[in-house]
Image (spheres, rainbow, N blue to C red):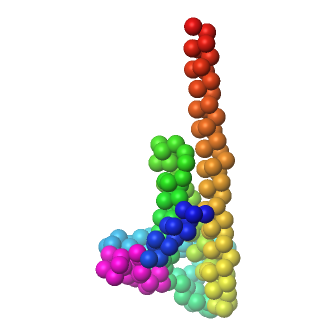
Amino acid sequence: MFLLFLFHFSWKIAIDGDMGGDRMYLFGKDITPAWFYTACVWLTSCAEWFIRLLPNMQDLVRESILLYFPQGGITISIVWGCLGLKQMFIYSCIILFYRGPFLKKLAYIPLSCVILTVYNIIRIGLITVFTRGYPERFDSLHDGIFRYIYYTIVFLLWVYWEEVIVKRHRNEKSQRENTGAESVDES
């Protein structure tokens, strides 16, 4: 919990960009990378692809970073705050500074970020679909239900790290130490 709050508030203090806008600031200096817009277009394309897998969703319109249905709903704009970078940064820092084998962290962190990105694509797609004809649902879906699911996934990834990877590493280390001690005793 300490690491979660530390990195959350570090982000809040340092990065004061508008999560709903297109600029990112570090201590007041614009640090918006050129690839942010490209990443937003990519995420929008992925969400469009997911939505089109669902039945009766072929009338979806995508324009650059916008998703909408012409017959009702709202226009969903995918901005840098939608990329999930803050959440992936906080999660990665927690795992990086948490106990466990460092080399396994180098594989686990990117894999976890891929899982979070896949969920994010599904989240954006479902918010777009569920607000079709019901724009008043946006806030409860975006700021409520799907955000809590996202953080539940983050928590479960951490639990898996602790309960499976760290414990397995400890057991393997303990077995090696016990095997080494037995070899010395037999000599």
Q: Position of residue 145 (x, y in %)?
A: 68, 76
Q: Total number of numbered labels?
A: 0
Task: Give whichever of 16, 177 is nearer the camera.
Answer: 177
The percent position of residue 148, horizontal first and vertical second, equals: 66, 72
Residue furthest top in the image: 187
The answer to whether residue 71 is left or right of residue 40 is right
Q: Residue at x 62, y 81 (%)?
A: 143
Q: Is residue 30 magenta?
A: yes
Image quadrant where one finds the N terminus: bottom right
In the picture shown, does residue 55 fall above or below 63? above
Taking the image as shown, residue 159 lies to the left or right of residue 108, namely right
Q: Which corner quadrant of the image does residue 140 belong to? A: bottom right
**Magenta span: helix, strand or loop, mainly?**
loop
Residue numbers of the magenta segment: 14-31
Residue sitting nearer the eye, 131 or 103: 103
Location of the C terminus (image quadrant): top right
Q: Is residue 93 magenta?
A: no
State the image quarter where residue 181 is shown: top right
Is residue 61 visible in the rendered structure shown here?
no
